[in-house]
Image (spheres, rainbow, N blue to C red):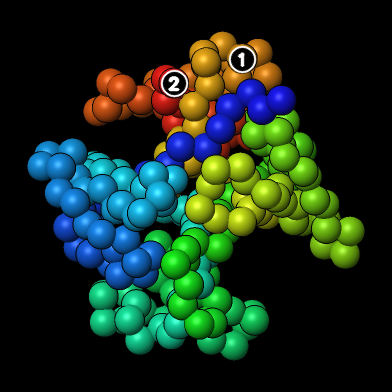
Amino acid sequence: MALARYVDLTIDARDTEKLARFWSRALGLRMVAYGADGYGLLGEDPTDTVWIRPVPHRADQHRRVHLDIYAADTDTLVEAGGSIVDRHSYPWDIALDPEQRELGVVVRPSERRRMYQVVVDSPDPEANAAWWGRVLDTKVHPVPEDPAIAFIEPIPGAPFESIVFARETRPKSDFNSMRLAITAQTPDVLLLLGATMCDEDNPDPARTWMRDPFGNEFTWVAP
């Protein structure tokens, strides 16, 4: 039985309109303004929701969470303000959004849903995957040929296929500017499993910032 379920994804931005326009084009979602709260990117299914929130004081030195997407081509991303930085090192292209946030781009015919996977840097990928696998009640997939990677799949109710955990040896120094939101009856069950509360100033009283046992922030939303 799942202890929690996926709700949506938040991306912090210094320029919410510019970033919302980029991700709206990249993900094929409509852009809705919410005044001082930023923008919502909305699709036909409620789980397609992405929030672009204003956080002008935060400038990440190293972003530990990024999104990989499907795209029919990369021209649309460049036209929307992104840039392509690597076409040759991987079977997918590496791009940057307008605020220099990395994203992987798998070029293939466009489909209704364009999110592919969320990638999270972690000091212990397999243990981190096991924790989230328990929380979301889904399968953990180690990668025997590459112990630096583990993933969970499927993600019930999510618009992407998997969450990938990749080994990162550098100490974490920045608050994650891209965060998963999950809902559970109470945050206490997550705390009992080793999550902790964040002490950062949260501008949204309806949401609670937490960290998993490996230091990566996420959001708890009341049912």
Query: Which dot marks residue 189?
Result: 1
User: Is residue 80 visible from the viewing direction of this image?
Assistant: yes
Which of disc 1 and disc 2 is earlier in sequence? 1
Residue at image coords 49%, 27%: 183
Of tags 2 and 1, the one toward the viewer is 2
Give amino acid for label 2: Pro
Secondary structure of the residue carrying numbered label 2: loop
Q: Is residue 84 above or below residue 184?
A: below
Residue at image coords 26%, 44%: 53
As drawn, is 121 to the left or to the right of 77? right
Give amino acid for label 1: Val
Name the residue that disc number 2 marks: 223
Residue at image coords 43%, 85%: 73
- Please identify the residue farthest to the left as the structure is shown: 35
Residue situated in front as seen by the camera: 144 or 223: 223
User: Is residue 19 visible from the viewing direction of this image?
Assistant: no
